Amino acid sequence: MKKVVLAYSGGLDTSVCIPLLKEHYGYDEVIAVTVDVGQPEQDLKEARVRAEKLSDSFVLVDAKQEFVHNCIFPLIKANGSYEGYVLGTAMARPLIARHVVEVARREGANALAHGCTGKGNDQLRFDAVFRTTDLEVIAPMRELSLTREEERRYAAEHGISFEHGNNNKRWSVDENMWSRSIEGSELEDPAFSPPEEVFHWTASIEEAPEEPELLQICFEGGVPVSVNGAEQDGVALIRTLNAIGGKHGIGRTDMIEDRVLGFKAREIYEHPAATILLEAHRDLEQLILTRNELRFKELVDRAWSELVYQGLVMDPLFDALNAFIDKTQERVNGTVYLKLNKGVARVVGRESPYALYSKDVSFDVKRDQRTAEGFSIYHGSQSRLAAITRGGDKR
């Protein structure tokens, strides 16, 4: 008996994959695996109902805590961002793929499958993990070059319904607790202004409260541990900040993104908690890390983010980058104060027992300032000499 395990989201692409894997690829048994990384409960319920109708068996894996501790917390430490995108989907895909592989090994499957197209980044993120096994990798959407309209017709022919929830909308949505991405249909036109209906997590600037809200976030080892003095586990903390930040319109991104394959794509994201936490973490690092650490870490953070975006988290370099980042975070302990108002999360204060902040910089501290003159004499000496050799140009 030929058995395949499918990474199943419950959406159109992966739902169409189930009959295709049987009819076109000849598999006798299709196991649908959904990994919970914080998507809405209603989406998970609909995925279960649809999978139990279409597939031979359904597996739901609760990976929310793992997603936070193994993916989101390292991302915060690395100030993870790719061209302004906070890497929510990119970070989740390898984790989902690993759980699909675990189910396949447990079930003695012959193959692994996903519903990614040949135009996006997710195919690479799934394939990078799937191809670490000796199992066949199947991607029906990519291999059959199906359009969305062809998928809809095929779904209708096989009684696959999307009458309820968000799946009948013309937008393609991917959601986990760190970010929500919206694309497709009219949004593919870079000049098209997205209607408010595409946003579910964030209020518009016009609807956001007039009065600002103050927020206090405490970090230990580069990781957030409390909001406004209340300690929370990672999942609860992120959900709390999504609610608070979303109310104030924090965390909308509308961007032209450079995909791995070279395409430019219009992407829209919502990520209130990510915006708040990354802003606070970067600010706290500025207070605590040395100038040399900050300059070098900026390069490391960028390399880290690009590997995540490409789905190459199994690359040895990724482990090496994490080792450096973790070392820098040993001192990143302290509290950051922010003001949220009308789409902006602004840091208004910070404190830490490891602050590299000297009171000597104060204008009110008495000290002999003449000691700085020697440094000032030699500062810029090469620049001044270069200006003289250019004929006295003193720009």
Image (cartoon, rainbow, N blue to C red):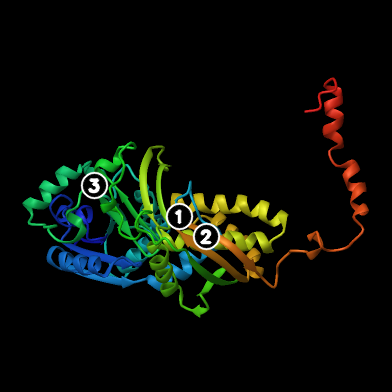
How far apart in space, not on screen, are marks 1 and 2 (Cα)?
9 Å
Q: Secondary structure at mark 3?
A: helix
* Residue count near mark 2 (Cα–Cα under 10 Å), binned few <14, some 14–19, many ≥20: some
Q: Residue at x 34, y 67 (%)?
A: 38
Q: Quadrant of residue 119?
A: top left
Q: Which residue is mark 3?
A: 141
Q: Secondary structure at mark 1?
A: loop
> What is the three-letter code of the residue carrying label 2?
Leu
In the rendering, at what x and y percent does residue 175 appear? Answer: 32, 60
Q: Residue at x 88, y 63 (%)?
A: 366
> What is the three-letter code of the residue carrying label 3?
Met
Q: Residue at x 16, y 47 (%)?
A: 151
* Residue count near mark 3 (Cα–Cα under 10 Å), binned few <14, some 14–19, many ≥20: many
In the rendering, at what x and y percent does residue 189 appear? Answer: 30, 37
Q: Secondary structure at mark 2?
A: helix
Question: Which is more toward the observer, 221 or 381?
Answer: 381
Closer to the eye: label 3 or 1: 1
In the rendering, at what x and y percent does residue 333 appear? Answer: 63, 71
In the displayed structure image, the side of residue 303 where residue 352 appears, left or right: right
* Label pair 3/1, CB-CB below 8 angstroms: no
* Label pair 1/2, CB-CB below 8 angstroms: yes
Closer to the eye: label 1 or 2: 2
How far apart in space, not on screen, are marks 3 and 2 (Cα)?
35 Å
